[in-house]
Amino acid sequence: MNTVNIPRLDLNTYINGSEEQRKEFSDNIGKAFNETGFVTITNHGLSKQLIDKLYEQVKALFALPEDVKLKYEKAELAGQRGYTSKNKETAKGFKTPDLKEFWQIGQTVSDDAPEKDDYPDNLIVDELPEFNTTTLEVYKKLEAAGKYLLRAIAVYLNLPENYFDDKVENGNSILRTLHYFPIENPDAVPADAVRAGAHEDINLITLLIGASADGLELLTREGNWFPVKAHGEDLVVNVGDMLQRLTNNKLKSTTHRVVNPPREEMKNSRFSVPFFLHPKSGMDLSSLPSTIDADHPKLYADITAGEYLDERLREIGLKK
Ligand SMILES: O=C(O)CCC(=O)C(=O)O
Ligand SMILES: [Fe+2]
């Protein structure tokens, strides 16, 4: 029998709750991140209205003609801003690209912020003004929710509650809007092609706005695939490799994938919107001394977040 602990946690009990409720939230998220690497979150600050509007705009974006979308694919941006067309991203260790196309939105900071020169400008979709405004609003809301989640995690790790605050303030987070496109003829795609091949996320934590269809699965420690289901507007939140490195594997960056639907449903699109919460590139990802001891020897070489991201983008084919 698999032990899969994906608790459903109310973020408001951490933000506005009593001491006891806050402690309970930290304990629960820490325990789940230690065991399975996944939780689902309610009361995260994004209204149903905003999520509905987001999906409406995301669908409109991918419905634009291919030549319009390709205007926004810029090799020099390595997929980090704007459009990435079909067959570009291949999960680490795979040869066949994922069956998806996506659009990424990055950090925006004020002109006088010290990080101003770190981030390329976002590409603006001229054809869909509301896509730009809606995704920016969603970005800021997910960034705020992520900051609270990291505070709860810091408490679980016996760090000062604000440990991550300055590291993620004006950080290099990415909002990815994803379209798993329809396959009219399943026989025409390579037999091993999947919507998203098994992978781990690169960043600290990922906040995923519940997808338009099933398909997300996580790999249990026993080696079985287990479906991750979110209720309604819940966020699915998981640990990424940066947080796993920082905690010397105390918190688990769990392998996950998106499987293809049954053959007769391959012609239906699937949309989803993950937010990859990254720190600033200078953050030191060296494992915390408190996570290293005789039973838990140090597993990773010291590296900064920026260096690590570069290495990983090359591995998945986005950076040359
Ligand atoms: O589409 C999903 O449900 C998950 C996507 C994902 O895991 C990713 O883009 O890293
Ligand atoms: Fe992922």
Image: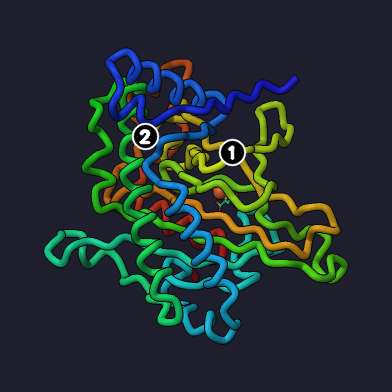
Mark 1 CB near ligand 1 (8 Å cut): no
Q: 192 or 315, which lies in front? A: 192
Please tell me which residue is depicted at 28% across the width and 17% down the height of the picture.
18
Pointer 2: what residue?
149
In the picture provided, is 36 more to the left or to the right than 145?
right
**Colour convention of the picture:** rainbow
The answer to whether residue 170 is above or below residue 97 is above
* Three-letter code, disc 2: Leu
Quarter of the rendering containing residue 166? top left
Residue at far front of view: 49
Callout 2 environment at 10 Å: few (<14), some (14 to 19), or many (20+)? Answer: many
**Residue 236 placement (x, y as % from top left):** 52, 40
Q: Residue at x 25, y 27 (%)?
A: 161
Q: Alpha carbon of mark 1 to alpha carbon of mark 2: how far?
A: 18 Å
Q: Residue 118 lies in what quarter of the image? A: bottom left
User: In the orientation shown, which residue stands out farthest toward the left?
Assistant: 112
Q: What residue type is labelled 1?
A: Ala
The quarter of the image holding the N terminus is top right
Per the image, the residue denoted by label 1 is 230
Tell me: 284 left or right of 63: left
> Viewer-proximal residue, 45 or 295?
45
Vertical placement of residue 95 versus 11, above or below? below
Give the numbered dot on residue 221: none
295 above or below 270? Answer: above
